[in-house]
């Protein structure tokens, strides 16, 4: 009877987290199916990598359907540890879509790289579940547990190419430095708890309401908040806490690098926004200086660090660091317009990143032995694969902020939000950084059309999954300026509901 009463008590709470529960049950079923079937002697020990991957994709699609048809629009569940609102709805939809895209673009890579491990898809699903829980986290305890679950999956994914020393090194570096950042984050949470006696985000916001008006001693609180910010900035690959990213991203399998670059930033940025603009909003002028400094460092290192790179994955990592700097500009504003600019930029950044990594994974020759590794390998791509080169050029122009492409629209609105908050210096530095970044983006285009490669390669046909992804993302990147108002209104609604 007590068990039935317990289930009835939390019935609505389970409905609120139904997509996460569905994905968890599906993942466990797929894991059992893979373990039992792949070790079956009667079936000849089949390799289930492709089968499990497609089942995982359909699981993510079903979870997306459950998310957009959630029976609740705003709800706090499980004793104030999880929250459902407009922001979580948007971010969860983005996580599920980006994880599906990462799975689709990795199908052919898993086959040609001989990564015959069905656990790859299981780990992607488990990390996606942890990201969904992280987005809904409304308490330090649930937040930290979700981050650790996500990190454990990432450590294994980074080292999943077991016959590669680089992949093993990447996994080990990620584990050691990730554990350090988690320790810093946990120490910051404990200091905030020690000062306030609270772990719930909303309770902390109420406790600190109006605290900036009084001349009270906040040293422990500021130290705790600073350590929490360092932990998140480390995981977001924001400078000067970016030093681990180039080695880890380069050593990991390319499909894993794509997943790292696309999906985790959505969940981490979501809970980071909830903390800064929710719990610590009254300490705006304390954390604004930290983000101001990190934003400038990220823009500077992202722009100039990418110029010295010769490998395509390292260049994309430094480009990602620069884009994190732009996102921090919007958070620095602390306004509805700033939050709207962050969400708009994040959505379009995901489209551009999916497009770029799909192209990188598509550059493989007919014999399946040559893969794009160095920037010079792009030589004469405009002649050997003109459609792919044109698509890549459009995306690079968009990432550089050339009008009228989607990247220009997102940066344009971001800089205006910064100027609306009187952050003129940060906006100016962002514009100058964007001008500098044009150099290495346009250099890639020059190599594709005018420079000879180290060896001439004839690339094979693109598989259907990548072709669909390229078609969708390129259409959004090129034609977004024709109908931007729908996304503008949606992001403004989410930002207003959160901060209004």
Image (cartoon, grey):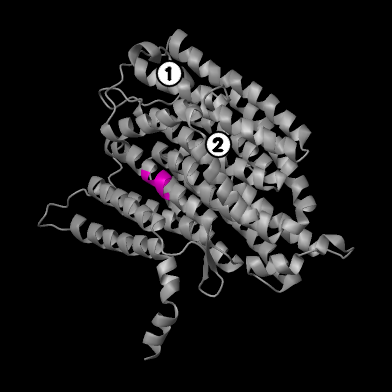
Rendered residue at 38%/58% (across/down):
69
Camera-nearest residue between 406 and 57: 406
Element type at mark 1: helix
x and y, in percent, of residue 215 in the image: 90, 63
Element type at mark 2: helix
Q: Is the residue 361 above or below the residue 185 in the image?
A: above
Q: What mark, if any, has residue 246 been given in the picture?
A: 2
Give the label, 1 or 2, closer to the camera. Answer: 1
Q: Is the residue 424 above or below the residue 272 in the image?
A: above
**Which part of the image, by quadrant, shows the C terminus?**
bottom right
Please count the marks in the image: 2
**Which part of the image, by quadrant, shows the N terminus?**
bottom left
Q: What mark, if any, has residue 378 been given in the picture?
A: 1
Rendered residue at 59%/20% (across/down):
438
Q: Is residue 434 left or right of residue 112?
A: right
x and y, in percent, of residue 367 in the image: 25, 24
Camera-nearest residue between 321 and 339: 339
Mark 2, other Cα within 10 Å: few <14 / some 14–19 / many ≥20: some
Q: Earlier in the sequence, mark 1 or mark 2?
A: 2
Residue 237 visible in the displayed image: no
x and y, in percent, of residue 18 in the image: 39, 65
Q: Is the residue 107 above or below the residue 380 in the image?
A: below
x and y, in percent, of residue 93 in the image: 44, 50
Give the quadrant of residue 363: top left
Q: Which residues are magenta?
A: 96-100
């Amino acid at each position: 009877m007590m068990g039935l009463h317990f289930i009835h008590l939390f019935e609505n709470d389970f409905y609120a987290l139904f997509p996460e529960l569905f994905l968890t049950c599906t993942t466990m079923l797929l894991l059992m199916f893979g373990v039992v079937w792949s070790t079956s002697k009667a079936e000849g020990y089949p390799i289930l990598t492709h089968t499990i991957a497609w089942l995982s994709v359909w699981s993510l699609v079903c979870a997306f359907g459950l998310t957009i048809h959630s029976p609740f629009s705003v709800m706090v569940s499980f004793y104030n540890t999880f929250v459902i609102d407009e922001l979580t709805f948007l971010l969860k939809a983005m996580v599920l879509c980006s994880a599906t895209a990462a799975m689709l673009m990795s199908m052919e890579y898993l086959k040609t790289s001989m990564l015959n491990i069905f656990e790859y898809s299981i780990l992607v699903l488990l990390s996606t579940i942890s990201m969904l829980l992280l987005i809904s986290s409304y308490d330090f305890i649930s937040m930290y547990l979700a981050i650790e679950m996500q990190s454990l999956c990432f450590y294994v994914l980074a080292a999943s190419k077991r016959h590669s020393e680089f992949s093993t090194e990447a996994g080990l570096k990620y584990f050691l430095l990730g554990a350090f950042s988690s320790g810093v984050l946990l120490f910051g949470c404990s200091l905030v708890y020690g000062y306030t006696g609270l772990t719930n985000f909303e309770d902390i916001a109420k406790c600190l309401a109006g605290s900036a008006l009084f001349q009270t001693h906040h040293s422990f609180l500021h130290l705790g908040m600073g350590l929490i910010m360092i932990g998140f900035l480390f995981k977001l690959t924001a400078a000067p806490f970016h030093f681990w990213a180039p080695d880890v991203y380069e050593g990991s399998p390319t499909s894993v690098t794509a997943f790292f670059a696309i999906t985790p930033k959505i969940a981490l940025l979501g809970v980071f926004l909830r903390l800064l603009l929710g719990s610590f909003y009254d300490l705006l002028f304390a954390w604004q200086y930290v983000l101001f400094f990190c934003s400038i460092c990220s823009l500077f290192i992202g722009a100039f660090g990418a110029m010295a790179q010769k490998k395509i994955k390292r260049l994309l990592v430094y480009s990602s660091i620069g884009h994190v700097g732009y996102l921090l500009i919007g958070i620095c504003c602390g306004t509805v317009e700033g939050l709207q600019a962050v969400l708009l930029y994040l959505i379009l950044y995901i489209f551009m990143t999916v497009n770029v990594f799909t192209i990188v994974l598509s550059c493989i020759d007919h014999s399946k032995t040559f893969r794009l590794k160095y920037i010079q390998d792009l030589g004469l791509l405009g002649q050997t694969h003109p459609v792919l080169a044109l698509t890549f050029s459009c995306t690079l122009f968009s990432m550089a902020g050339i009008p009228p492409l989607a990247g220009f629209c997102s940066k344009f609105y971001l800089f205006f939000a910064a100027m609306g908050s009187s952050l003129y210096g940060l906006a100016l530095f962002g514009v100058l950084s964007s001008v500098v970044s044009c150099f290495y983006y346009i250099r890639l285009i020059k190599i594709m059309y005018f420079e000879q490669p180290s060896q001439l390669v004839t690339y094979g046909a693109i598989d259907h999954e990548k072709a669909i992804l390229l078609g969708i993302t390129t259409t959004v990147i090129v034609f977004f300026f024709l109908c931007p108002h729908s996304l503008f209104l949606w992001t403004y609604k989410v930002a207003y509901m959160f901060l209004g």
